[in-house]
């Protein structure tokens, strides 16, 4: 059974804390949000969450939550894309689990122009297609591990930027080998430095940075001793 704890963005599988697709993306792109204040990131995340909910409610013909002007514009852009590309939402906000190794929750499976597709809704000012490629690929692997290559005809980002025209952008799929190889790297960094006990990404990278710094200092010392100049 998969459980999700909103506070801390934590997934539990049968009561055991399990990495999320978001954790994997942070591992692959550790510097993506460097220099961006936390309060700005939180505001952007909140904006996107409300737009996601609005799209979900619209598709389910449920009451749409209260939206500000820009969120209303995003929803209207989605409606235009839906009409233009004949988007038929089949499943929304589904949690997936890959062999108890990682979990995630994808936005939408949709029939788009008569093709079975996996979609992610984005409200960012710029679209990071490489990051989305990893994200959707990990979702697809968890959803259909035995038929990963063929389950979805295409991946799409449903891009609804805050102050621009919405776009449907096709996203390249990663190979299963790429996904599993990268996950092995993630596991290695999170496990080997603490006698097999799990470490989070920040702790792991801090440890790696410390080890790199120690290695540089040792190398400089050895060079100084060799030249007897320090």
Image (cartoon, rainbow, N blue to C red):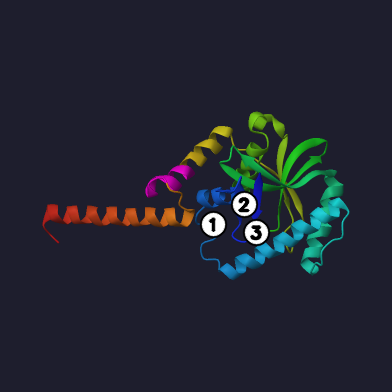
What is the crowding at mark 2: few (fewer than 14 residues within 10 Å), some, or many (at least 20)? few
Residue at position x 65%, y 59% in the image: 6
Res 164 visible: no
> What x and y, as percent, mark residue 128?
62, 52
Asked if the residue at tag 2 contacts the one at tag 1, i.e. Cβ–Cβ closer than 8 Å, the answer is yes
Q: Is residue 58 visible?
A: yes
What's drawn in magenta, residue-wise? 186-196
Q: Residue at x 52, y 48 (%)?
A: 28
Mark 1 is surrounded, within 10 Å at the Cα level, by few (under 14), some (14 to 19) or many (20 or more) other residues, namely: few
- Between circles 3 and 1, the one closer to the viewer is 3
Quadrant of residue 9 in the image?
A: bottom right
Residue on which the image places disc 1 = 32
Q: Is residue 12 left or right of residue 224?
A: right
For residue 213, what is the image quadrant?
Answer: bottom left
Quadrant of the drawing holding the C terminus:
bottom left
Which part of the image, by quadrant, shows the N terminus? top right
From the top left corner, tell me how far across and down residue 142 is, in percent: 64, 38
Count of marks overlaid on the render = 3
Q: Read off the residue under disc 2.
A: 128
Report whether 212 appears left or right of 43: left
Residue corresponding to mark 3: 6
Q: Nearer the viewer, residue 162 or 62?
A: 62
Query: Residue at point 79% right, 42% down?
Result: 110
Instruction: Check whether the beta carbons of the residues at disc 3 and disc 1 lie within 8 A of each other.
Output: no
The answer for how far apart the CA atoms under marks 1 and 2 are is: 10 Å
Reply yes or no: does residue 33 show up in magenta.
no
Q: Is residue 194 magenta?
A: yes
Between the C-alphas of marks 2 and 3, the distance is: 25 Å
Number of the front mark, 2 or 3 = 3
Question: What is the magenta segment's predominant secondary structure?
Answer: helix
List x then y, in percent, for residue 88. 84, 43
């Amino acid at each position: 059974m998969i459980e999700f704890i909103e506070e801390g963005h934590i997934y539990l599988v049968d009561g055991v804390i399990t990495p999320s697709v978001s954790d994997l993306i942070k591992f692959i792109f550790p510097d993506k949000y460097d220099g961006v204040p936390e309060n700005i990131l939180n505001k952007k995340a909140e904006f996107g969450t409300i737009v996601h909910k609005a799209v979900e409610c619209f598709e389910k013909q449920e009451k749409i939550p209260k939206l500000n002007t820009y969120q209303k514009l995003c929803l209207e852009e989605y409606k235009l894309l839906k009409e233009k590309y004949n988007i038929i939402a089949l499943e929304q906000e589904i949690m997936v689990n890959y062999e108890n190794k990682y979990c995630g929750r994808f936005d939408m499976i949709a029939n788009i122009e008569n093709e079975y597709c996996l979609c992610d809704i984005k409200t960012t000012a710029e679209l990071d297609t490489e990051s989305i490629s990893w994200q959707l690929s990990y979702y697809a692997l968890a959803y259909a591990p035995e038929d990963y290559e063929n389950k979805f005809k295409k991946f799409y980002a449903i891009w609804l930027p805050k102050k621009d025209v919405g776009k449907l952008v096709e996203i390249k799929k990663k190979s299963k080998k790429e996904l599993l190889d990268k996950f092995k790297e993630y596991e290695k960094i999170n496990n080997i430095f603490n006698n097999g006990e799990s470490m989070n990404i920040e702790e792991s990278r801090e440890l790696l940075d410390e080890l790199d710094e120690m290695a540089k200092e040792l190398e400089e010392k050895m060079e100084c001793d060799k030249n007897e100049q320090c």
